[in-house]
Image (cartoon, rainbow, N blue to C red):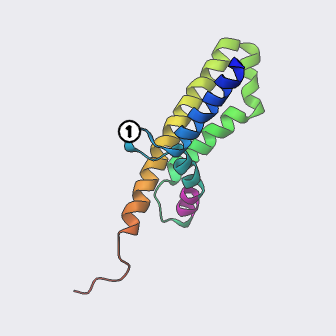
Amino acid sequence: MAKTLKRTAAFTALARALTSGARGGPSIGARLTALPRMLLASLRGEYDGGKRIALMAAATAYVVSPVDLVPEAVMFFFGLADDAIMITWLAGTVLSETERFLEWERRRAAVIPGSVVP
């Protein structure tokens, strides 16, 4: 019974974290749904996050690649430490870049399309 209550509380906390942002920022759910839009806007050249997205992709590829298993096999602690550092950097970068992208989308939506006539 106690395990069920703990599990329910954990899922409730996760659902709250996904639906409400901390300190007034975007929620985790809003950030995750912004990722595909951010990628498309960068590929189209509308958003200037191309280099940061490439670095995030490289970090993700490094963490999930089989080549990364060599440091873990040879030097267990240091192999896991480099993964922890990379994942921490990646999480922080994704959070900051998605917040920056969502702000860019808000500002862009406020602009009225047209041309300036002198």
Q: Nearer the viewer, residue 14 or 93?
A: 14
Other residues around mark 1 within 10 Å, as few (<14) / some (14–19) / many (≥20): few
* Residue found at the far bottom of this picture: 117
Between 39 and 18, the residue placed more toward the observer is 18
Residue drawn where x is 60% and y is 35% of the image: 12
Query: Relative to 16, is 30 above or below?
Result: below
Percent from the top left, x then y, of residue 5? Answer: 66, 24
Q: Nearer the viewer, residue 35 or 118?
A: 35
User: Image quarter for residue 106?
Assistant: bottom left
Q: Main secondary structure of the magenta part?
A: helix
- Relative to 111, say whether 68 is above or below: above
Residue that appears at 49% across and 36% down: 92
Q: Element type at marker 1? A: helix
Which residue does the image show at 28% across and 82% down from the upper left?
116
Kindly identify which residue carries mark 1.
23
Q: Is residue 21 left or right of residue 75?
A: left
- Locate the N terminus by quadrant: top right
Q: Position of residue 79 (x, y in %)?
A: 67, 19
What span is colored magenta in the figure?
37-43
Image: 73 above or below 100: above
Residue 42 vertical position relative to residue 12 in the rendered view, above or below:
below
**Does the magenta-highlighted stretch encompass residue 40?**
yes
Taking the spot 51% from the left edge, 50% from the top edge, the residue there is 51
- The amino acid type of the residue labelled 1 equals Arg
Which quadrant of the figure has residue 87?
A: top right
Q: Residue furthest front?
A: 1
- Let me know if residue 36 is in the magenta part: no
Residue 103 x, y percent position in the rendering:
40, 55
- Judging depth in this view, the residue of 49 and 9 nearest the camera is 9
